[in-house]
Every structure is written in C-alpha cells, then in structure tokens.
Amino acid sequence: MNLSTIISGLIAILLVLYLSRLSSKFLLVLFGQTIYNFLLWPGVVIHELSHLLGAVITFTRVHGFSLWPKKIDGGTVLGSVTHEASNNPITLIIISIFPLLGGTFILWLVTMLLPQAPVAPVFNVSSEIWLNIVGYFTSWFTWVINLWQVFDFTIWQTWVFVYLTFCIAAHLSPSTHDLKYTAAGLTALSLLIILIVFISQLLGQNIGVQLAIWTMGAITFLLPLLSYAAALLLLVVIISGLAFGLKKLVR
C-alpha cells in the first residue's frame, strides 16, 4: 500500500475534524448564537441533508428531519435527522460520516468559483519523514497565501466563495454523537475485516490484498477533496481566529 497516500488521508481527516470545530467555536463567539444560526444556516442544510442522504442510501427508515434550531437538554441543536437504530457497522459509518464527505464535496465545488485556484498539497514519504511533515504543513500555509492572491473582491464569485466556505466549514465536522457512532462502526467493521482475512488465509485465499486495493482506491479518490477542505478550513481559522483575538483585546 502507498504509505504517502495513507498518511496524507489521515492527516487531512484529522485536520478537517479539528479545524472545523475550532472555526465553529471562533465564529460562534464572534457572532453570538442567534446571528451565528442565521448567517451560517446554509452549512446546517448541507450537514443535515448529508445525514439524510446517508440514511436513504443505506435504506434506513427516517422518522424525523429538521433544519431549524431547537433547545435540547440545555443546549442548542441546529438541525437533526432522526432515524431507526442500526447494528450494521457500515450503516453507522455512512450516516455519521456523510456530513464530512458531503460538505467536503461542496467545498470542492465552491472552489471552482475561483479562477486559477492552486492545487492543495499532498504528503510525501521518504527517509526524512519528519522533515516532510514540517514541509507538508508549511506547504499548506503557502497554499493559503496563493489562494488569497487569486481573490478578486470586485467580482461576486469571490464573495459567494468566502461566504459559503465559512458556512460549510463551521458545520463540516460530525457532531460528538456522530463521531461515537462512527467509532463504534469502524471498530465493528475492523474486527469483521480481520476475521474475514483470517478465515480466507486458512482457506488459502488472499482477500486481504483486494481489500487493501479497495481501501487505497477510496483514499485516493477522497484525498484531493479532503486536502481542499483542510486548506480552506485553515484559511477560515486564521481569519476568524484573528478576529476572535482582536475582539478579546478590545474587551
């Protein structure tokens, strides 16, 4: 298996999850709950529709669907999809992780609004792996700078790009509840795969190679989208973080 691709995929996923939550925190503090809900509502729509699509393609019965904020147990839920419980690990993973995939895909489409948008970096593995890790993150900052240079605020496409990026970025990461279901599904699926590979080896078959090929194909397909999402989130965190810091200084 291509180690570079696997490491790139893991780094991109972890960064997307962390930076999305961080950007959401900054934007919530900057705008307050009411304005945050109103301005960033398109991100809620994409998030919940992704959950709904995940339920539909896994043939999971949906009992409720909402795109409006409501208070539950002392907190605020911006939207929700209520569906029947499932013990199928693949179903759990698909429904829980689809907001990440759906939002990432929409971000990639939004990037097409910008002319000559730079290509996001990909991690490369060599004997000097730690130097490559530093270079990988440095290249992301370079990507953000290059992206900023192609902004033309005299055209409407740039403003639409900026607005949608903020909306989607804030709601890209699955909720804590979703991540628990994803972790449970991944654990069950991993144990099932290990069992299948073990039995296939006892029978003289090598299913593990085919599974590895499928896994690499999925990572290779998603990596460019995740790289764009992570780099755009980095841009959002830098801008919102600076505004967050200035707000604290003013106080």
Image (tube, rainbow, N blue to C red):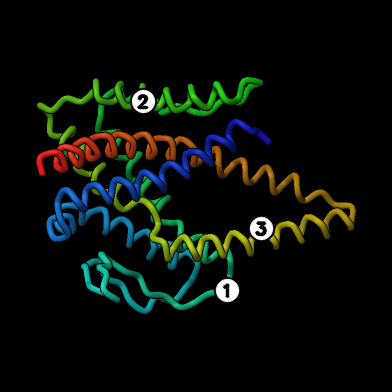
Q: Please name the residue shown 42% across and 50% down the image.
A: 101
- Label 3 vs label 2: CA separation? 35 Å
Q: Measuring from the top left, give residue 139's x and y in whole percent.
A: 42, 23
> In the rendered view, would you say 154 is above or below 25?
above
> In the rendered view, would you say 73 is above or below 178?
below
Q: What residue is shown with label 2?
A: 141
**Left or right of 228: which side holds 26?**
left
Q: Measuring from the top left, give residue 124's x and y in whole percent.
A: 57, 25
Amino acid under disc 3: Ser
Q: Please name the residue shown 23% across and 73% down the image.
A: 71
Q: Please name the residue shown 43% across and 67% down the image.
A: 56
Q: Earlier in the sequence, mark 3 or mark 1?
A: 1
Q: Measuring from the top left, give residue 106's x and y in whole percent.
A: 33, 45
Quarter of the view holding residue 4: top right
Amino acid under disc 2: Phe
Foreground residue, 111 or 96? 96
Total marks drawn?
3
- Label 3 vs label 1: CA separation? 14 Å
Q: What residue is shown with label 1?
A: 87
Question: Can residue 161 be seen from the camera position used here?
Answer: no
**Left or right of 13: which side holds 198?**
right
> In the rendered view, would you say 34 is above or below 173?
below
Quarter of the view holding residue 200: bottom right
Q: Which secondary structure lies at badge 1?
A: loop
Q: Measuring from the top left, give residue 212's x and y in whole percent.
A: 69, 44
Q: Which secondary structure lies at badge 2?
A: helix
Q: Are marks 3 and 2 in contact (CB under 8 Å)?
A: no
Question: Can residue 229 be seen from the camera position used here?
Answer: yes
Q: Which secondary structure lies at badge 3?
A: helix
Q: What residue is shown with label 3?
A: 190
Q: Earlier in the sequence, mark 1 or mark 2?
A: 1
